[in-house]
Image (tube, rainbow, N blue to C red):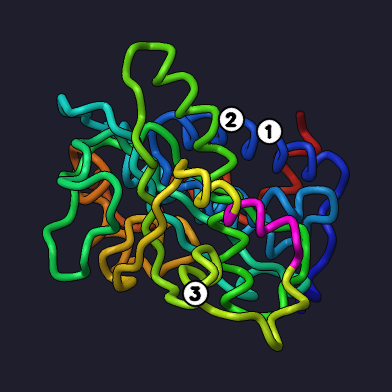
């Protein structure tokens, strides 16, 4: 529980300005900021000194990794999605849904889910990254994964329509997840017993699978590109994963690149008062 001193109204405004400025850049290019921004945004109306410290750390990260670049390669223009969820990873027992959307080549057989031993689809730059804190409290990791499939499939419906109208008709969109029970629930191969409390609106995805709009399949978590956007990670993991998502991973300066005299926690409220 955060017991640090609350921020002044002026400091809260400064925090909101930081979130608003970085959010556009994160959605358009540097998706590695999305998880941190989501957590900060959930606390922006009741921020504390700990929130200000986290915002300063995020600014330091941006200064250390400036000018991210996403590279797109020519492909078969087939939408492909990786879906993941982190269970109870946010405040108030909330969970986070994540999705990694790319355009790639179609599966060898678009009507059959690829086997875990088969090669993965070619990587490409992400056209959309979903990283959202789900507002409801979920009762299990399976329910969180099923909810993530629901959120990602809803976003995919608009993209499928857009691609079709642009002259790229879409087969059943493959969605990769790392939870086998969630896959079974979408195909009705796993029968409900204690899972009857799962929110019924998540079964929307089952109907769309039955209509051949989506193809849900399982792969282990280490092969799921959405995992990176589903939770907070240590510094070492960010450094190791950036080359998988961005064209360059150049690091500028060192730790604490933001001017500590201007943006430190101790000066956060002072700077805001002087504006």
Taking the spot 33% from the left edge, 71% from the top edge, the residue there is 221
Query: In the visual, does 175 lie left or right of 151?
Result: left
Which residue carries the number 3 mark?
189
Q: Can residue 201 be found in the magenta stretch?
A: yes
Foreground residue among 1 and 126: 126
Main secondary structure found in the magenta portion: helix
Q: Nearer the viewer, mark 3 or mark 1?
A: 3
Answer above or below: position of 269 versus 124.
below
> Which residue position holds label 1?
17
Q: Which residue is mark 2?
A: 21
Mark 3 vs mark 1, CA separation in Å:
48 Å
Quarter the C terminus occupies = top right
Q: Earlier in the sequence, mark 3 or mark 1?
A: 1
Q: Quadrant of the N terminus?
A: bottom right
The answer to whether 30 is drawn above or below residue 220 in the figure is above
Give yes or no for contact between labels 1 and 2 (Cβ–Cβ under 8 Å): yes
Estimate the spatial distance between the alpha carbons at disc 1 and disc 2, rounded to whole Å. Answer: 6 Å
Give yes or no for residue 93 being in the magenta stretch.
Answer: no
Numbered disc 3: secondary structure: loop
Residue in front for this viewpoint, 113 or 42: 113
Q: Which residues, given as a range, are shown in magenta?
A: 199-206
């Amino acid at each position: 529980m955060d017991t640090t001193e609350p921020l002044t109204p002026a400091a809260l405004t400064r925090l909101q300005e930081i979130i608003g400025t970085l959010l556009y850049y994160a959605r358009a290019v540097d998706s590695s900021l999305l998880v941190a921004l989501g957590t900060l945004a959930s606390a922006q109306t009741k921020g504390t000194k700990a929130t200000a410290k986290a915002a300063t750390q995020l600014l330091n990260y941006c200064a250390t990794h400036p000018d991210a670049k996403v590279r797109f390669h020519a492909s078969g223009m087939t939408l492909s999605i990786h879906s993941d969820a982190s269970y109870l990873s946010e405040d108030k027992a909330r969970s986070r849904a994540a999705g990694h959307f790319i355009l790639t080549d179609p599966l060898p057989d678009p009507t059959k889910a690829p086997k875990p031993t088969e090669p993965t689809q070619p990587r490409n730059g992400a056209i959309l990254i979903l990283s959202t804190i789900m507002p409801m409290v979920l009762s299990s990791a399976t329910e969180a994964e099923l909810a993530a499939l629901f959120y990602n499939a809803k976003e995919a419906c608009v993209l499928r329509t857009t691609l079709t109208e642009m002259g790229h008709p879409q087969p059943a969109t493959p969605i990769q997840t790392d939870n086998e029970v969630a896959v079974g629930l979408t195909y009705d191969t796993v029968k409900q017993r204690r899972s009857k409390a799962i929110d019924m609106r998540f079964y929307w995805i089952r109907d769309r699978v039955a209509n051949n709009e989506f193809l849900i399949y399982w792969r282990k978590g280490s092969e799921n590109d959405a995992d990176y956007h589903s939770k907070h990670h240590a510094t070492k993991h960010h450094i190791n994963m950036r080359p998988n998502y961005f064209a360059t991973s150049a690091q500028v300066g060192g730790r604490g690149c933001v001017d500590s005299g201007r943006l430190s926690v101790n000066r956060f409220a002072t700077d805001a008062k002087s504006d």
